[in-house]
Image (cartoon, rainbow, N blue to C red):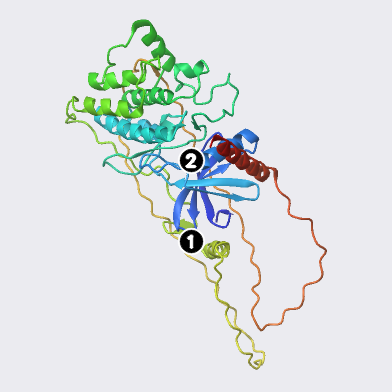
């Protein structure tokens, strides 16, 4: 079985990796459900402060995937989120290529809706890209996306954790003013949304520098092939190099998108449906839909009960009986558990999509395969039964006091610094 973290979260298998931490599928023994757990990998001061900022973010919106809880165990810290199994928009493009315009409009409307709530909280995301937009498993029904990964987000007015001549984010999704060292603003997020829209409609990552140069030299170009003119006008309003000429708010861009959808033609008869299916794959051995299976589940459940102050009832001792005369005992039969293969669903992907190389497009990067989660053994301890004599344990010299690890100390200092700054603003 996996490692039980803080007596509650059992790490199952890794499902992603970011700059500051690895994301695991984990079993929550208290709530009895699977969650996504982001475990901090590094422990330098800047990384720890960003981790503290991200776990403190609480935004309740159906299209935002924000942290729900956090825990610390020795020199490790993590926070958990809802488990979203449909992969990212990058997976969808890898399976289908360019997406139908009406399907893209649904995704953009949900993204702008979630982003409007994020901006209303005064938070600039700063890393909007297809890999950070996750999809729920909806099959061929209406898609449902979740904006995730707030690792480098910041509230307007907060002190920056990097020097002013450094740009934080993903190359290719920077707004022009970010490259000039401007302070993070909401309009930079909207520029990235425009790039995501082009990526979904063309099937490849757009060349943002070529787009900016074209806009500055020739003005707003005509709609690229395959993009309806009303939809292109909304995307062009997101991609303006001058932030003053760009949409100022996500709500304003969403209203313009709603008006553009009414002017789009109906779906084509030969248009294939887009299916969003489970991208996480089957659970590893020892885990099922209802959580861990096997003897280790009882150990983990006991650890969870102990953490909550709940302990099993003590079994009374059995009255002693007269010893029976020794007899020759037959050998005990050997039993072997039979484990059949786990049933997993099979999915039929559509044939590869071939399309000409679009303008302002770059070749997408390949994905990284998932690894396997490490396993950790459990140690059994004897149970003290009332009424049964137990010899006293030998005297033992007192050991050294428990040490406070540097990451935990940094986490405490980071929380103190954030709290002190919040008090100074009031």
Which of the numbered marks, if any, corresponds to residue 24? none
The secondary structure type at the circle numbered 1 is loop
Task: From the viewer's perspective, tell me whether residue 2 is left or right of residue 223.
Answer: right
10 or 56: which is nearer to us?
56
The answer to which image quadrant residue 197 occupies is top left
Task: From the viewer's perspective, tell me whether residue 304 is left or right of residue 44.
Answer: left
The mark that comes first in sequence, 2 or 1, is 2
Q: Which residue is pictured at 34% across the width and 31% down the height?
A: 112
**Residue at mark 1:** 293
Task: From the viewer's perspective, tell me whether residue 339 is left or right of residue 405.
Answer: left
Q: How many marks?
A: 2
**Residue 304 x %, y %:** 54, 61
Label 1 neighbourhood size at 10 Å, few (<14), some (14-19), many (20+)?
Answer: some
Task: From the viewer's perspective, tell me whether residue 290 is left or right of residue 306.
Answer: left
190 or 375: which is nearer to us?
190
Q: Which residue is pictured at 50% across the width and 17% down the height?
A: 179
Q: Which residue is pictured at 65% across the width and 47% down the height?
A: 75
Q: Quadrant of the N terminus?
A: bottom right
Q: Which residue is pictured at 47% across the width and 56% down the height?
A: 287
Q: In the displayed structure, would residue 146 be above or below residue 384?
A: above
**Residue 408 x %, y %:** 65, 45
**Residue 174 x %, y %:** 46, 21
Give the Cα separation between the discs numbered 2 and 1.
Answer: 34 Å
The secondary structure type at the circle numbered 2 is loop
Q: In the displayed structure, would residue 241 be above or below residue 205?
A: above
Answer yes or no: is residue 194 visible. Answer: yes
Answer yes or no: is residue 99 visible. Answer: no
**Residue 74 x %, y %:** 65, 50
Q: Which of the two discs, 2 and 1, sits closer to the camera?
A: 2
The answer to which image quadrant residue 326 occupies is bottom right
**Residue at mark 2:** 57
């Amino acid at each position: 079985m996996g490692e039980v973290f803080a007596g509650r979260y059992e790490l199952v298998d890794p499902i992603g990796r970011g700059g500051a931490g690895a994301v695991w599928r984990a079993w929550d023994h208290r709530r009895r459900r699977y969650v996504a757990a982001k475990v901090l990998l590094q422990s330098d001061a800047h990384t720890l402060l960003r981790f503290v900022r991200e776990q403190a973010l609480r935004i309740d919106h159906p299209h935002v995937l924000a942290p729900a809880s956090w825990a610390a165990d020795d020199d490790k810290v993590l926070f958990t989120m809802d488990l979203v199994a449909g992969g990212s928009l990058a997976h969808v493009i890898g399976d289908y290529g360019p997406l139908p315009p009406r399907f893209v409009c649904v995704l953009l409307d949900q993204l702008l809706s979630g982003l409007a709530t994020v901006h209303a909280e005064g938070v600039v995301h700063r890393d909007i890209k297809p890999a950070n937009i996750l999809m729920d498993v909806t099959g061929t029904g209406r898609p449902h996306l979740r904006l995730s990964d707030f690792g480098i987000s910041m509230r307007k007015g907060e002190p920056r954790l990097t020097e002013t001549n450094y740009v934080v984010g993903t190359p290719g999704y920077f707004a022009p003013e970010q490259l000039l060292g401007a302070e993070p603003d909401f309009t930079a997020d909207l520029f990235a949304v425009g790039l995501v829209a082009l990526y979904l409609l063309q099937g490849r990552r757009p060349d943002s520098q070529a787009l900016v140069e074209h806009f500055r030299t020739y003005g707003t170009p005509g709609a690229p092939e395959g993009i309806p003119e009303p939809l292109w006008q909304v995307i062009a309003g997101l991609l303006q190099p001058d932030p003053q000429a760009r949409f100022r708010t996500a709500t304003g861009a969403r209203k313009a998108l709603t008006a553009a959808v009414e002017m789009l033609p109906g779906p084509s008869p030969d248009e294939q449906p887009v299916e969003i299916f489970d991208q996480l794959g089957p659970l590893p051995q020892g885990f099922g839909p209802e959580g861990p299976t096997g003897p280790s589940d009882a150990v983990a459940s006991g650890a969870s009960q102990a953490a909550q102050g709940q302990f099993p009832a003590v079994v009374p001792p059995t009255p002693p009986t007269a010893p029976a005369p020794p007899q020759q005992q037959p050998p005990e039969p050997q039993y072997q558990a039979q484990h059949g293969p786990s049933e997993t669903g099979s999915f039929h992907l559509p044939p590869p999509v071939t399309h000409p190389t679009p303008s302002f497009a770059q070749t997408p990067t390949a994905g990284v395969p998932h690894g396997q989660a490490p396993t950790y053994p459990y140690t059994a301890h004897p149970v003290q039964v009332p009424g049964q004599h137990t010899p006293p344990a030998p005297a033992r010299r007192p050991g050294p006091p428990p040490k406070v690890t540097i990451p935990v100390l940094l986490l405490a200092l980071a929380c103190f610094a954030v709290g002190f700054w919040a008090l100074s603003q009031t």
